[in-house]
Image (cartoon, helix red, strand yellow):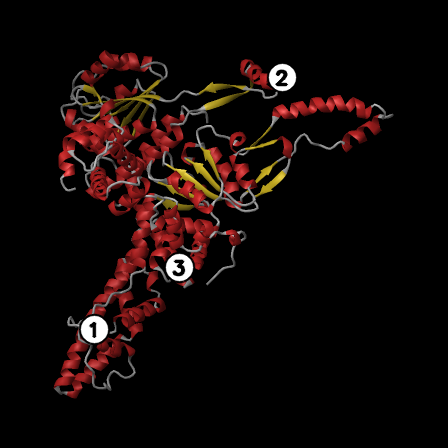
């Protein structure tokens, strides 16, 4: 039984339920407590010891159900009549498998298959290309060849009961084969399905955000990654930060405190220095030229909004609007749709957008503010209004420009990125999630004490 | 397949002998537990591990700890976590005032006792003989965690909303949670005679550290299905008509399928049921729901979103 549990833990790890050795020990103890008799009890007990989060519980339940389901052999005879007495079969002798097939012994077959699977180590399967080979090996261990012999022998008798018997065996062999294929397939899913996931995430992180070959599944996965990243950032940066000014006595509070001890300053109080919370203004381009990347830029915008206490978000294509309320009131998906519905995919006009920003919101920019601009800097040959850009730079603490295009293309065609870049403290290419994460972290880190 | 009973198991009350008994026992103190909840609790007691309870607000996380304490007849020690909670407020503190007083008394007495000492050496010897009381039990102010460890008959320790505390505090909890002991530099190590049953609750404000999660059993309490919720309402609001119960639970269940900022959880359902009883309602109608919706929904936008749909939501009931 210990072996079974070990295998189950391995299946769990494959399903991304992280199981540490300490938890494995817990699981063993839990099983020792509850035993294997009550399936539901076992499931709940293992769940409590192994799955450590809402999503892990879901994955645990799924894995448990697959893992502890047996190969199911449905009885062939639909009528409930007990199998009629078979005349003694000389062919069946010496072969448990043939006997079980003929007597329709479903549970016996399941058990035999499980034993064979253990013997031939089906659970070591990794790749889907191994399936047929593993299936053959497992069936071999069950004595698949014996069926063949039995069929031949039955046919060899040449009479009609013999023929009937052969038919029956043929059918049994087909179901057995189908069931074995399914069983092996399931094992492969169980142990290997998610094995490749990590590398897949890595690949996605490197993939360009506006690449054309992203399918819906990739996009969903990427958005999930962005959100995960945002949550991590939020944890790290949303807390109130106080740093002790070491050695600086707060006389007033120390004296106050000392009253309780008869005027003796028993508990010294130290001065604190309040740390600035990041104050961020984000301006996001959602026009045609960055259409593909816009979704991710907006996802990032949304995530930042969660991570940072004080943030103003703007989006523009031909003109600029504030999207604070949209981000605040909606879920990520809704917010993106809503923003795109309002202003997306018109002709880019950086000059107008900067003009709008300076007219209405420049007073919000002060020496604590970091301005982040997400966009490709392609102006459609309209006046880029460098003067406004310079003004923003002078007023703000820092200007950071993240451009989905590669640096080599800055300044080509209608791009004036190279000119804007002069007014930015940081101007960087940012076209993959990996880069995005690094940059965002850098931005936020510049505010924290370490 | 039995393992030797853990220390303290002999003290286990009857409700802890099996999961079924635990479900019944919790039911008898007014907590309707699903099997998964009861199993997790059963494992926590038997494996002597803390249990981390997660779920949205109002789903009965804190209530589970309260009911367990009630069921087992153990004292409950509750510690509410918040940002900035530290050792001095959670574990122990020295009674500075008393210590101060003590030194003053000591000073007064010292002259008397040392008056006849002839040499410095002798005076020092006598001083040592007076006992070093300054850092000792009488001056220790135990805070919740310490209190929990010093209950010799065991107790239920509820560490509420651990996700609100700082990461540093979380790390500090690790020693207590894994070994049920703490080290006080001046006194030595305090070990619990009977390990307390520890509940940690979390609203998922932030993800907890892996180290903490690994040391705990995990229980996620989901929103209940209709049948369970009806039983909960029936237990919590005695005297409610069965038909009204069914109606209001199915309305709440329907509400949860709508995308709201804050879906109503069990505590809201119970509050609503109580409100309806106060209004002497025996069945739901659109007007009544309209008037009492603010008990269920806590956001203006949610109420605005639901109001036009009330009669439609009442339909299947």
Do tags 1 and 2 sit on the same chain?
Answer: yes
Give whichever of discs 3 and 2 has the lower sequence position: 3
Q: Position of residue B237 (x, y in %)?
A: 30, 39
Query: Left or right: where does residue A236 sit relative to residue A149?
Result: right
The C terminus of chain B sits in image quarter:
top left
The answer to whether residue A205 is above or below residue A19 is above
Proximity of marks 3 and 2: CB atoms separated by less than 8 Å: no
Give the quadrant of residue A95: bottom left
Residue under pointer 3: A5
Residue under pointer 1: A173
Distance, label 1 to label 2, CA atoms, is: 94 Å
Give whichever of discs 1 and 2 has the lower sequence position: 1
Q: Secondary structure at mark 1?
A: helix
Query: Left or right: where does residue B120 sit relative to residue B96?
Result: right
Q: Secondary structure at mark 3?
A: helix
Residue under pointer 2: A262
Q: Nearer the viewer, residue B288 or A27?
A: B288
Q: Position of residue A189 (x, y in %)?
A: 28, 56
Q: Position of residue A350 (x, y in %)?
A: 20, 19
Q: Nearer the viewer, residue A443 or A12?
A: A12
Q: Secondary structure at mark 2?
A: loop
Q: Residues within 10 Å of mark 2 (few under 14, many from 20)?
A: few
């Amino acid at each position: 039984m210990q072996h079974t549990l070990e295998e189950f833990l391995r299946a769990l790890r494959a399903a991304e339920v992280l199981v540490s050795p300490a938890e494995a020990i817990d699981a063993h103890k839990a099983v020792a407590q509850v035993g294997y008799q009550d399936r539901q009890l076992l499931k709940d007990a293992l769940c409590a010891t192994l799955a450590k989060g809402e999503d892990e519980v879901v994955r645990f339940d799924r894995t448990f159900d697959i893992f502890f389901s047996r190969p199911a052999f449905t009885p062939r005879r639909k009528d409930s009549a007990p199998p009629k007495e078979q005349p003694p079969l000389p062919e069946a002798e010496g072969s448990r498998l043939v006997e079980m097939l003929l007597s329709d012994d479903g549970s016996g077959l399941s058990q035999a298959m499980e034993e064979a699977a253990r013997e031939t180590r089906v659970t070591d399967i990794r790749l889907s290309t191994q399936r047929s080979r593993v299936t053959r090996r497992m069936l071999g261990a069950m004595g698949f060849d014996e069926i063949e012999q039995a069929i031949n022998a039955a046919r060899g008798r040449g009479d009609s009961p013999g023929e009937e018997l052969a038919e029956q065996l043929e059918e049994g062999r087909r179901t057995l084969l189908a069931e074995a294929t399914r069983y092996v397939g399931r094992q492969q899913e169980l142990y290997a399905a998610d094995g490749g996931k990590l590398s897949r995430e890595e690949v996605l992180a490197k993939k360009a955000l506006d690449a054309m070959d992203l399918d819906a599944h990739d996009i969903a996965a990427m958005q999930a990654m962005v959100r995960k990243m945002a949550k991590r950032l939020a944890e790290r940066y949303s807390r109130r930060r106080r740093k002790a000014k070491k050695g600086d006595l707060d006389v007033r509070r120390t004296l106050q405190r000392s009253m309780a001890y008869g005027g003796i300053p028993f508990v010294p109080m130290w001065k604190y220095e309040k740390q600035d919370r990041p104050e961020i203004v984000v301006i996001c381009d959602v026009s045609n030229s960055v259409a593909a990347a816009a979704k991710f830029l907006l996802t990032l915008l949304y995530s930042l909004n969660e991570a940072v206490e004080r943030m103003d978000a703007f989006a523009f294509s031909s003109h600029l609007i504030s999207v604070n309320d949209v981000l605040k009131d909606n879920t990520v998906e809704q917010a993106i749709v809503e923003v795109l519905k309002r202003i997306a995919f018109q002709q880019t006009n950086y000059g107008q957008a900067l003009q709008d920003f300076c007219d209405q919101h420049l007073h919000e920019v002060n020496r604590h503010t970091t301005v982040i601009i997400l966009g490709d800097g392609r102006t459609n040959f309209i006046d880029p209004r460098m003067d406004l850009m310079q003004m923003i730079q002078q007023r703000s603490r820092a200007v950071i420009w993240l451009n989905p295009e590669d640096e080599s293309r800055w300044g080509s065609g209608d791009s004036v990125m190279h000119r804007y870049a002069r007014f930015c403290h940081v101007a960087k290419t940012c076209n993959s999630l990996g880069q995005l994460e690094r940059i965002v972290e850098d931005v936020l880190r510049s505010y924290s004490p370490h | 397949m039995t393992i030797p009973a853990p220390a303290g198991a002999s003290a286990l009350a009857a409700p802890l002998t099996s999961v079924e008994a635990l479900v019944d026992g919790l039911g008898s103190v007014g907590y309707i537990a699903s099997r998964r909840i009861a199993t997790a609790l059963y494992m926590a007691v038997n494996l002597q591990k803390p249990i981390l309870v997660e779920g949205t607000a109002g789903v009965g996380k804190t209530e589970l700890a309260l009911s367990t304490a009630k069921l087992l007849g153990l004292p409950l020690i509750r510690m509410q976590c918040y940002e900035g909670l530290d050792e001095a407020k959670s574990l122990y503190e020295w009674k500075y005032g008393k210590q101060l007083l003590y030194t003053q008394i000591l000073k007064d007495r010292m002259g008397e006792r040392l008056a006849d000492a002839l040499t410095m050496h002798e005076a020092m010897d006598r001083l040592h003989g007076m006992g070093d009381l300054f850092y000792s039990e009488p001056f220790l102010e135990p805070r919740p965690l310490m209190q929990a460890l010093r209950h010799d008959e065991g107790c239920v320790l509820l560490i509420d909303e651990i996700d609100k505390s700082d990461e540093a505090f979380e790390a500090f909890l690790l020693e207590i949670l894994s070994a049920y002991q703490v080290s006080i530099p001046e006194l030595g190590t305090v070990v619990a005679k009977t390990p307390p049953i520890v509940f940690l609750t979390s609203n998922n404000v932030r993800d907890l550290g892996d180290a903490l999660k690994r040391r705990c059993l995990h229980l996620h309490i989901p929103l209940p299905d209709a049948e369970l919720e009806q039983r909960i309402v029936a237990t919590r609001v005695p005297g409610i008509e069965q038909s009204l119960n069914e109606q209001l639970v199915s309305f709440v269940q329907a509400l949860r399928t709508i995308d709201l900022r804050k879906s109503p959880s069990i505590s809201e359902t119970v509050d609503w049921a109580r409100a309806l009883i106060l209004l002497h309602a025996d069945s739901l109608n659109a007007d009544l729901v309209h008037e009492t919706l603010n008990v269920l929904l806590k956001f203006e936008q949610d109420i605005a979103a639901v109001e036009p749909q009330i009669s439609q939501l009442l339909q299947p009931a």
